[in-house]
Amino acid sequence: MTRPVITTQRLELRPMTPEHLPLHRELDTDPAVMRYLLGRSRTAAESDEFWAPRCAEKIADAAGLGWWVGFVDDSFVGWWDLGRSDSEPGDGVKLGEAEIGWRVLRSQWGKGLAPEGATALLHYAFETVGLDRAWAETMAVNTPSRRVMEKIGMQHIATEVRDWDDPLPGSELGEVTYEITKADWTHPWPQIISITGPR
Ligand SMILES: CC(C)(COP(=O)(O)OP(=O)(O)OC[C@H]1O[C@@H](n2cnc3c(N)ncnc32)[C@H](O)[C@@H]1OP(=O)(O)O)[C@@H](O)C(=O)NCCC(=O)NCCS
């Protein structure tokens, strides 16, 4: 199995490849986008260095997992991932479960795009890949991302305060973990339109 193209009402999620490397600069050089991730923007060079091995990564493809870049009317809006955001390039994949994540351009916030793409990925995870569980993690103070988790039917299962060498503001309130199992998956929105072969 390789990652398919997944189409929703508004989004086309395409498997991320090296051709998408420059798109990350627009996201990662925005300090608002990176506020709860690094606490600062990346430079373009840092963005390229971080994303080049991830764009080229193929290991997760065997399990149908990895990163997808999202387009609305052929314009890039952000990325979504299943099973890779907690990994280093080259790591193997876990069986039966995957972390889910998202990052959307600031100009596109508030339109419900993150939950739309994530719902489609959950549908794909449970109905096509055959996962039993998806989980997501963020800083407790990252209300927008927690709202996405709630909107797609995930449940808050843990809050953990961790020790960081260079803590971000709000880290004293901890990191939250949410999950959804296949048994709890109720197809909240019938937004997925098609899952097609590799592009
Ligand atoms: C988290 C994120 C993906 C949400 O994407 P989105 O497509 O805007 O999602 P939604 O439209 O469903 O909005 C979710 C919440 O974001 C917040 N939000 C909406 N518009 C916003 C705006 N213009 N500015 C700030 N926050 C906004 C609201 O809390 C909203 O919840 P609500 O619909 O109950 O009011 C996006 O904010 C983002 O990319 N943030 C930076 C990267 C990040 O933190 N990723 C997650 C790391 S775990």
Image (tube, rainbow, N blue to C red):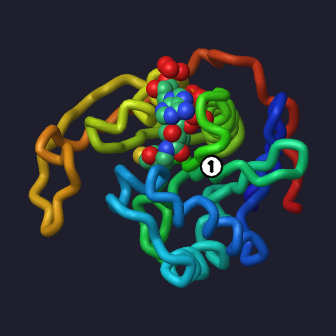
**Looking at this view, is 18 or 188 the one in front?**
18
Task: Classify 1 as above or below 154.
Answer: below
Count of marks, rendered view: 1
Report whether residue 181 is seen.
no
The spot of residue 91 in percent (x, y) is 46, 73
Q: Is residue 161 left or right of residue 43?
A: left
The spot of residue 188 in percent (x, y) is 63, 16
Which residue shows up at 89% across the image and 51% down it? 74
The spot of residue 76 in percent (x, y) is 76, 54
**Looking at this view, is 34 or 120 the one in front?**
34
Q: Is residue 76 left or right of residue 86?
A: right
Residue 186 falls in which quadrant of the image? top right
Image quarter (top left, top right, bottom left or bottom right) of the C terminus: bottom right
Regarding mark 1 in the picture, which secondary structure is present there? loop
Which residue is denoted by mark 1 in the rendering? 105
Q: Is residue 167 left or right of residue 134?
A: left
Crowding near the residue tagged with mark 1, few <14, some 14–19, many ≥20 C-alpha atoms within 10 Å: some
Task: Classify 69 as above or below 92.
Answer: above
Report whether residue 192 is seen.
yes
Label 1 lies in ligand 1 vicinity (Cβ under 8 Å): yes
